Image (cartoon, rainbow, N blue to C red):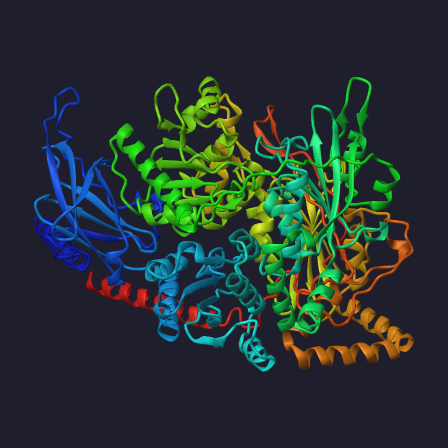
């Protein structure tokens, strides 16, 4: 009996202690229990909040349950109190683990009333309040009669963007400016291991009255790049800027950024910035002030800056479309239904014009629309671009080769202004602004049609573009797998092709004003809301977490006019934005239709509802309709219904964009990370093939992190959709000269390092100071995903995509039978000569064979070789070296460290090896000049090619690559080199580490106290 008394006494004391500890976690807000979700808005995380006990356990399933209408008044306060004026919260209500559907309305207390029908026996509800940029908060309530107040705290990224904007406004006075532009590297760049798109949401919410949605430019940076902000105000001709670097709120520079600044002012600006974005901020700001096309600004942000290559590429594309418009989208074979382009591009990488051509034509590497190899030894120049219009039915094509004459254009500029554009960065800034005026007024003066050929045969087509597998022509003939040769001018001119005929029709150019263009977005958003209200009875509020608009606005033209400002209308009406991941802006070719897809997802459901609009030039809208329904469920069940799929593409989404829309919509349902979304949008669709780029990039950044003076160059051997995700999130591209492609036959990329894997390519981490690189073969093995429960390729593909997203986020997925493998092998330290040879096609070898045959040397041994070679060079070229040194000193005096740094990078990456090691037979040898101003073209040694093929294999239901590609040399512009990591990139790491120690110590202490209490 005494033992029982002791036991009862002990249990009672224990329960009292538990109640005391729990009291710390219970608020006095109408006896509701509060839980805080540390994650930003993400349905997959919201759903793990506390579950309400089942109040109906005693009710038989066959017994009828009486329901009644219930109202809950809620109010949301924000860490930034002014957000109550601009932000609309969203809510979830759950009971017994099931979602409760509700209607909401604004009440007299500036809060919301949530109305729903539910069992009269239910008295407990789990309510979550959320909005982009804030941590969601959940409360369990036991009474619907009392108001509930939520107090949302901002995420770290949102606070950074918001506080930077507040600080910038204080020193620049936004209201006193004519216009405000923001340029930032926030987005894919990470803060505390999280992407930072919400920093831009913080900028928008603070500055929405003065900073337009489309006046924020997000640079394409990688996860490991610093987070920088530049706020630029324009008042008359005056441009002022304040720059915050490396996630700091202490300004690095405050002052003028105008092209009319003095050299002393330019030097002060450049020297004040510790990072690499000085030219990016200055070129974009002055291009914006000069009135360059918003499409060009968008591409320049993708490329990293405005330069003559960007402007030249845009001019070439505009002229191409005028005389050789698109006629047919074709595929290079394999791949997904979205891997089609109207043009195939033959480039000479290293010049920014290649990035511009791919961007405006949506002919990317991952869509097998681009091949770029250093073919200067055959007569090509860096500024040349070839375009193939392929007619698949006739198996013939046109080949148009164009260029912009840099020397002539610079001479014209000097004649008009008396300024030498090669004198330095400031002079090039003035040159680029002058070029913008030319584009706006007389673009035909800037480009030249060099050759215009037709009747290109299938054999010639594949010789230039390459093919990873044999192409069967008929029962008796096939074209063997062959590496791509790109813009091989000797071969092309030897074909004696007949001259192509230009199109003579003149397109009508629209006359819509900026306000009218914005109004298209307002009308589309309003119509989308009306459709959902009429069809589903759902009232769409601003900032709705589960409602998004997908659109081609901003990439396509409407009767010759850019459509960027349509996005402003969508943002104003719906509150959706790219940075809250609910305005998804599809990368499309300029001539595609202006369309809008309104998408709604449901928590814990596979349903995805869509409405589709197309804007017609006459001001009307086409509205998609499927058997009388204007809202269609396009989730997995629909994807597994082949008959319904056929009907949807005929009447509901008839513009050839169904695949792009449904793949991203079903991926968006799963809340993918921001860097994934940006890669999907750049690639124009989601497919399993684009996903390996995430795992390869993550592997590279973890195992080969960049240090001072280092940059990435990637030489691809097996190319497919993943190369677009590598382009976007690894910070490399053909235009930068850091993405080289040597397409190899499939038989040569089968890995000997990972069973069942593919040797994707070679990564080189190049140290520009030491002149040493570390090269490694990168191998990827696909995961195995069970898709046997579905019958259509669309449903199987969606299952694979979901598996990849779960892998990327660390979520469990029982359909993943084997996880992917990424591995690096054959590490070699290489010198500059080997690096250049690797980029130029590896001589008589291919990339893989070349790496495997290199001697295994230490870094010190390679540096010793460099030193010996340099001494020999000094003895033979002492006078030349002295002259070059003088040039470098002069550049430093005229412009500043920006030129010196870029000059060094350009020289390092662009020396060409001698003719006996080049895949081409020409004996010419080219070297870059020692002094190159930012953006100045030099002899091209850049090469690059990219193609992608991905296939569905019915045998194992996996979509995997079927092709590879071929590469060559690199880079023509000083700053077209993969971005170097600034020395202060990790300056905050010590603070983060110290903070982590304090946090861990605090948690340990708190746990110890609680332990002592018990």
Q: Nearer the viewer, residue 874 or 817?
A: 874
Percent across and percent down for residue 670 are 41, 40
Percent across and percent down for residue 475 are 79, 17
Q: Nearer the viewer, residue 501 or 481?
A: 501
Q: Residue at x 71, y 70 (%)?
A: 422
The total number of labels drawn is 0
Q: Nearer the viewer, residue 690 or 757?
A: 690
Q: Is residue 385 above or below residue 13?
A: above
Residue 908: quarter of image: bottom right
Percent across and percent down for residue 240 are 46, 73
Side of 897 relative to 138 (left or right): right
Q: Nearer the viewer, residue 89 or 359?
A: 359
Residue 606: quarter of image: top left
Residue 605: quarter of image: top left
Side of 89 relative to 343 (left or right): left
Asked whether the viewer can see residue 661, the reply is yes
Q: Is residue 56 above or below residue 228?
A: above
Q: Is residue 646 above or below residue 18?
A: above
Percent across and percent down for residue 85 are 24, 57
On the rendered image, what quadrant is the C terminus found in?
A: bottom left
Side of 202 relative to 392 (left or right): left
Asked whether the viewer can see residue 481, the reply is no
């Amino acid at each position: 009996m005494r033992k029982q008394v002791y036991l009862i006494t002990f249990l009672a004391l224990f329960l009292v202690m538990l109640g005391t500890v729990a009291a710390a976690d219970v608020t006095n807000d109408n006896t509701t229990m509060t839980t805080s979700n540390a994650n930003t808005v993400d349905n997959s995380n919201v759903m793990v909040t506390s579950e309400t006990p089942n109040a109906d356990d005693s009710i038989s399933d066959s017994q009828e349950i009486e329901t009644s209408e219930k109202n809950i008044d809620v109010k949301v306060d924000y860490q930034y109190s002014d957000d109550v004026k601009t932000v609309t919260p969203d809510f979830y209500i759950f009971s017994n683990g099931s979602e409760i559907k509700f209607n909401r309305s604004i009440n007299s207390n500036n809060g919301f009333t949530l109305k729903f029908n539910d069992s009269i026996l239910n008295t407990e509800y789990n309510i979550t309040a959320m909005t982009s940029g804030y941590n969601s908060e959940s409360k369990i309530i036991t009474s619907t009669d009392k108001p509930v107040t939520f107090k949302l705290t901002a995420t770290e990224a949102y606070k950074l963007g918001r506080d930077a904007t507040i600080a910038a406004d204080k020193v620049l006075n936004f209201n006193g400016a004519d216009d405000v532009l923001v340029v930032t590297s926030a987005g894919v760049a990470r803060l505390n291991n999280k992407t930072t798109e919400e920093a831009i949401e913080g900028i928008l919410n603070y500055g929405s009255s003065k900073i337009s949605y489309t006046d924020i430019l997000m640079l394409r940076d990688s996860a490991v790049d610093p987070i920088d902000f530049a706020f630029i105000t324009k008042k008359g001709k005056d441009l002022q800027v304040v720059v915050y670097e490396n996630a700091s709120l202490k300004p690095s520079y405050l002052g003028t950024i105008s092209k009319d600044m003095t050299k002393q002012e330019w030097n002060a600006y450049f020297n004040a910035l510790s990072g690499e974005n000085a030219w990016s901020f200055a070129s974009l700001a002055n291009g914006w002030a000069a009135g360059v096309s918003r499409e060009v600004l968008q591409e320049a942000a993708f490329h990293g800056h405005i330069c003559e290559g960007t402007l030249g590429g845009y001019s070439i594309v505009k002229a191409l479309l005028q005389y050789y418009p698109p006629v047919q989208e074709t595929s290079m074979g394999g791949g997904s239904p979205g891997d089609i382009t109207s043009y195939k591009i033959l480039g000479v990488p290293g010049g920014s014009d290649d990035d511009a051509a791919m961007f405006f034509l949506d002919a990317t590497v991952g869509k097998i629309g681009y091949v770029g190899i250093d073919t200067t030894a055959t007569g090509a120049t860096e500024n040349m671009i070839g375009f193939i219009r392929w007619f698949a039915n006739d198996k013939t094509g046109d080949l148009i080769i164009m260029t912009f004459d840099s020397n002539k254009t610079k001479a014209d500029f000097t004649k008009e202004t008396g300024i030498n554009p090669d004198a330095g960065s400031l002079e090039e800034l003035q040159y680029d602004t002058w070029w913008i005026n030319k584009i706006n007024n007389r673009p035909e003066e800037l480009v030249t049609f060099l050759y215009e050929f037709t009747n290109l045969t299938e054999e010639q087509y594949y010789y230039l573009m390459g093919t990873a597998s044999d192409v069967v022509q008929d029962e008796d003939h096939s074209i063997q797998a062959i590496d791509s040769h790109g813009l091989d001018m000797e071969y092309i001119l030897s074909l004696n092709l007949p001259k192509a005929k230009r199109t003579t029709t003149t397109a009508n150019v629209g006359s819509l004003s900026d306000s009218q263009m914005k109004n298209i977005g307002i009308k589309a958003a309003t119509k989308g809301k009306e459709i959902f209200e009429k069809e589903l009875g759902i009232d769409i509020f601003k900032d709705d977490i589960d409602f998004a608009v997908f659109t081609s606005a901003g990439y396509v033209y409407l009767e010759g006019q850019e459509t960027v400002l349509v996005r402003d209308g969508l943002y104003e009406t719906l509150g959706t934005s790219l940075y809250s991941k609910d305005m998804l802006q599809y990368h499309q070719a300029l001539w595609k239709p202006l369309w809008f897809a309104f998408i709604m997802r449901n928590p814990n459901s596979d349903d995805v509802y869509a409405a589709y609009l197309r804007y017609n030039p006459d001001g009307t809208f086409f509205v998609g309709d499927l058997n009388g329904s204007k809202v269609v469920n396009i989730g997995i069940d629909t994807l597994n219904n082949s008959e319904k799929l056929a009907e949807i593409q005929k009447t509901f989404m008839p513009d050839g964009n169904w695949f792009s829309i449904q793949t991203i919509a079903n991926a968006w349902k799963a809340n993918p990370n921001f860097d994934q979304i940006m890669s999907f949008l750049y690639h124009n669709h989601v497919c399993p093939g684009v996903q390996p780029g995430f795992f390869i990039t993550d592997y590279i950044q973890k195992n080969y992190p960049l240090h001072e003076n280092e940059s990435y160059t990637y030489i691809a051997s097996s190319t497919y959709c993943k190369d677009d995700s590598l382009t976007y999130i690894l910070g490399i591209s053909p235009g930068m000269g850091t993405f080289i492609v040597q397409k190899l036959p499939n038989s040569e990329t089968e890995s000997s390092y990972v069973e069942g894997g593919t040797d994707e390519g070679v990564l080189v981490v190049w140290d520009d100071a030491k002149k040493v690189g570390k090269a490694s073969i990168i191998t990827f093995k696909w995961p195995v995903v069970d898709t046997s429960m579905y019958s259509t390729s669309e449903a199987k593909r969606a299952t694979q995509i979901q598996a990849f997203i779960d892998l990327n986020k660390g979520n469990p997925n029982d359909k993943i039978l084997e996880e992917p493998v990424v591995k690096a092998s054959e590490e070699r330290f290489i010198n500059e000569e080997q690096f250049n040879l690797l980029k130029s096609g590896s001589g008589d070898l291919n990339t893989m064979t070349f790496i495997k045959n290199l001697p295994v040397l230490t870094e010190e041994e390679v540096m010793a070789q460099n030193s010996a070679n340099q001494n020999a060079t000094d003895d033979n070229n002492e006078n030349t070296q002295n002259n070059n040194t003088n040039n470098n000193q002069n550049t430093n005096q005229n412009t500043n460290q920006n030129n010196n740094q870029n000059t060094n990078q350009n020289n390092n990456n662009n020396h060409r090896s001698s003719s006996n090691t080049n895949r081409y037979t020409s004996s010419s040898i080219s070297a870059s000049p020692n002094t190159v101003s930012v953006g100045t073209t030099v002899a091209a040694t850049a090469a690059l090619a990219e193609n992608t093929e991905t296939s569905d294999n019915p045998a194992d239901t996996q979509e995997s690559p079927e092709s590879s590609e071929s590469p060559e040399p690199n880079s023509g512009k000083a700053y077209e080199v993969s971005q170097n990591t600034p020395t202060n990139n990790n300056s905050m790491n010590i603070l983060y580490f110290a903070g982590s120690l304090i946090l861990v110590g605090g948690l340990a202490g708190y746990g110890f106290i609680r332990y002592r209490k018990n």
